[in-house]
Image (cartoon, rainbow, N blue to C red):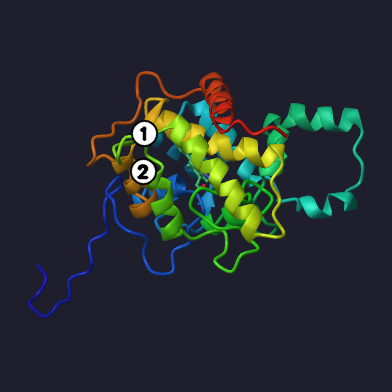
Amino acid sequence: MPSSTTPLLPQQPSTGEYAPAPPNASRSPCPVVNALANHGYIERSGCNIYMKDLNASMRHVGMSSLLGSVFAKPTYIEFQNPAKAYLQKPVNFFTRLWRLIRNPYSFFAYFGCWKRGQVSNGKRYINLVDLATHGAIEHDISLTRRDVDQKEGNNALQQDLMNDLLHYSSDGGETLTIEDLGKFIKSRIQQQLRDNPNLVYGPSEHQVNCGQVALLMHCFGDGKAIPCSYVRAIFKDERLPWKEGWKRRTWWPMGLFEFFGAVKKMTAAVGLQF
Ligand code: HEM
């Protein structure tokens, strides 16, 4: 029994319990991955995250194991700066095919965020801030982050963008529909065209952007709309919105085909032609 003079050690929150990021934690531009860290489903420090753990955490937001692994596994491929792609040796068809047979996830190699040397116990790891590596998954024109070339950087939540996002609710702040989000993304494109002279936003960045919003709408909403209270919990507190009434999909997790359909619907709602 501790004596009255023994200092009590602060109690570690249990797995699943929410706690804001500890001081000096590593965090990413993805509110959902940050929330998974704040619930302890991956390291709360956001450091030394192994593929196995990031991959396993995806089920906590109701993704099928295949869809989860399509997002988690390619992250551990070495980052290739797209601006330096011309330095890479050309690879013939058979080499590419062989690589694909050995590792089907190499199809998504452009999502790689891993940096050489990040190995511990013989396994690759990432720190959450690595997800902000521009040109891998991170792209210009996010919903709530500014761009890499702006002084605010591409990682931290921007309060004004968060407020703007919620103002796009067409039912007085109850929900955000796909159409509301489509309009918001369009307005963000106009805003970034004015504010960022170095803007890069082509069809692939747009697909990834719409893909992230599609995931949000299907894992946390009903595919058509998401309650604003959930959006506040996820983006502001970086917390799973259990208190607000959300339950993860268990019987029918979000799978790959549903994801493709959802991205198509989201891009149609933005209505951008390239
Ligand atoms: C291993 C899995 C995941 C990785 C590596 C990942 C990575 C990222 C990255 C790098 C960004 C920043 C993109 C940018 O705006 O520049 C991002 C944004 C985002 N992610 Fe994730 N993510 C993952 C899983 C998820 C899941 C499961 C969801 C939703 C259910 C989600 C929802 C979002 C949303 C909505 C954004 C947009 C944030 C904004 O534009 O302000 N992500 N993600």
- Residue 95 position, x and y percent, is 87, 32
Looking at the image, residue 213 sits to the left or right of residue 236; the answer is right
Q: What element carries label 1?
A: strand
Q: Which amino acid does label 2 sit on?
A: Val
- Residue 88 position, x and y percent, is 88, 49
Tell me the quarter of the image containing the C terminus: top right
Q: Can residue 150 be seen in this view?
A: yes
Note whether ligand 1 is within 8 Å of mark 2: no
Which residue is more in the foreground, 237 or 10? 237
Tell me the residue that label 2 is attached to.
231
Which residue is more in the foreground, 203 or 89? 203
Question: Which residue: 32% across, 59% down?
Answer: 20
Looking at the image, residue 226 sits to the left or right of residue 76; the answer is left
Tell me the residue that label 1 is attached to.
226
The disc placed on residue 265 is none
Q: What residue type is labelled 1?
A: Ile
Which residue is more in the foreground, 252 or 164? 164
Whether tag 2 and tag 1 are in contact, CB under 8 A, the answer is: yes
- Residue 69 position, x and y percent, is 55, 33
Question: Which residue: 89% across, 53% down?
Answer: 87
Quick one: label 2, few (<14), some, or many (20+) residues within 10 Å?
many
Looking at the image, residue 274 sits to the left or right of residue 39; the answer is right
- Residue 213 position, x and y percent, is 50, 37
Distance between the Cα atoms at labels 2 and 1?
7 Å
